[in-house]
Amino acid sequence: MQEFLRNAISQGQGAEPADLVLKGGRFLDLVSGALVSSDVAITGDRITGTFGTYAGKREIDVSGQIVVPGFIDTHLHVESSLVTPLEFDRCVLRHGVTTAICDPHEIANVLGAEGIRFFLDSAMATVMDLRVQVSSCVPATHLETSGAALAAQDLAEFMNHPKVIGLAEFMNFPGVLHLDPTALDKLALFAGRHIDGHAPLLRGMALNGYLAAGIRTDHETTTAEEAKEKLSKGMHILIREGSVSKDLHALIPLITERNSAFIALCTDDRNPLDIAEEGHLDFMIRTAIAEGAEPLAAYRAASISAARAFRLHDRGLVAPGWRADLAIIDSLEDCRVARVLAAGRLVDDALFAARPKVAPVGYGSVKARTVTASDFRITGSGRSVPVIGVMPGKIITEHLVMNLPVRDGAMTCDFGQDAVKVVVVERHGINGNIGRGFVHGFGLKHGAIGSTVGHDSHNICVVGASDEDMALAVNHLGQLGGGFVVVRDGKVLAELALPVAGLMSDQSFETVRDRLIPLRAAAKSLGTVLAEPFLQVAFLPLPVIPHLKISDRGLVDVDRFCLIDGAGAS
């Protein structure tokens, strides 16, 4: 360490050539907001010189370009990118994301501690700095069947891992407010460390109680009014723009110089096709600026504010002594990333190729029973039926009530009201449960869309206009070992295998990106009106997001945090 310090001090003073110099460009000073004409000197993984001219052992010409701090995605689930952490690394690092803070609770709800260990091993191998929050909610609630359960004592072994920041999003906010002993055990274990929040629509005195537990962040805020209350009560708001949850436009007015110290950016769930077509945090930055956000505030939210919120005090500025995580862009407004440095290393194919290999886990995790069309029969009068109402661009759903047609004692789809069936089939080999209900907002007229990605317990979720096609979708997913499938008239139109815990592909992100294109087209051929139908399916079984959801145990009234009696589960 002393040798490094001698080199850093000498090179920072210009007494010796720096290891690397970015020459001829400007950098964004996040303190003043100025664009400063200066070289940027780097020693090892650290910035050692700005506001000057430097000679380097290696020099990169960045004339006409701007150096900004690398971006920090403050909340995401790598699993929702549909690729393994090493492929996620390759996919998003080129978009300037040099730090990502993930919660592996998707794989943890399938595999338990084995899944968390896989992510920690992967985080030690990635080029980007992939940080891990220990999953707080495995299972997320008592209203569903997950593949594993992790109590506080199970989490303790991970607390001191060098990649662990703290406790991941505490989704079971009703458990916190009702003083559930299991919830309190986990909060007590991580007291004094970072605890991530998850508090959709939580306001007033209930919000105060939730924050009193030491929770500091929230990525589930969907309106400016809600965000202002949470900001005023000390929460750090993580503005989200994923493949399904799109909150950026509603919250852009918050991205001001005054608020920027308490604002950060995240994607939560974003797939490789959307990343290829739009971008990642770079997309959020340019979109926010185009819609009126102050550039200084946007870049602060993407870097220094995010770093401070998660106690990563070594990064987020282009300044001597700070970690050399840098993105080189052509303009602040466009935020098109030309080159990236991660810990002082220029990101290229050779850098990715030199990473250690990490073997995927979770093959053979789909253990759902074989089903038939008769398993999806929903008996009832058809009067005043609870129906899940999908809201495009949000994972919040409405609790609708409809009168549905009845044939031979069973309720059927009503295309006129856009009410089709949704079924959740337990797939961990524990109890074989099937939850049944109806959903509005997909626009399906034919066939079925099925997924083993079903937050957060990841049972099989199928939306369909035909019981026969829904059954085929479930059974085919079992044969695939997990994934997405589109079925119509007894035929599989398209599929994407996700054999790693039924959540991730073991192929490259380019392969997944390309296979999503025909899959999306096949879904649209069924009549769906949703831009991203697969992740929308995946959020229907998420019983910690208001207002009406479904699990393998049946329909869930999230506001009352209970199952709806007689709602069709077995």
Image (cartoon, helix red, strand yellow):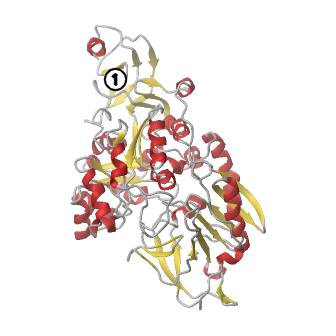
On the image, which quarter does residue 281 sit in?
A: top left
Asked whether residue 139 is in view, the answer is yes
Could you tell me which residue is drawn at 31 percent across and 15 percent down? 4
Residue 253 is situated, as x and y percent measured from the top left of the image, at: 34, 56
Quarter of the figure with the C terminus: bottom right
Q: Is residue 491 above or below residue 90?
A: below
Could you tell me which residue is drawn at 37 percent across and 19 percent down? 44
Asked whether residue 225 is in view, the answer is no
Q: What residue would you read off at disc 1?
A: 46
In front: 179, or 292? 179
- 10 Å crowding of disc 1: few (<14), some (14-19), many (20+): many
Could you tell me which residue is drawn at 58 percent across and 61 percent down? 429
Residue 334 is situated, as x and y percent measured from the top left of the image, at: 47, 40
In front: 420, or 97? 420
Q: Is residue 40 above or below residue 111?
A: above
Residue 339 is situated, as x and y percent measured from the top left of the image, at: 49, 29
Quarter of the figure with the N terminus: top left
Count of numbered marks: 1
Residue 22 is situated, as x and y percent measured from the top left of the image, at: 41, 20
Could you tell me which residue is drawn at 42 percent across and 67 percent down? 545
In front: 76, or 282? 76
Mark 1: amino acid: Arg
| Horizontal side of residue 129 vs 86, given as left or right | left
| Horizontal side of residue 331 vs 363, given as left or right | left
| Outermost top residue | 15
State the SS at label 1: strand
On the image, which quarter does residue 460 sit in?
A: bottom right
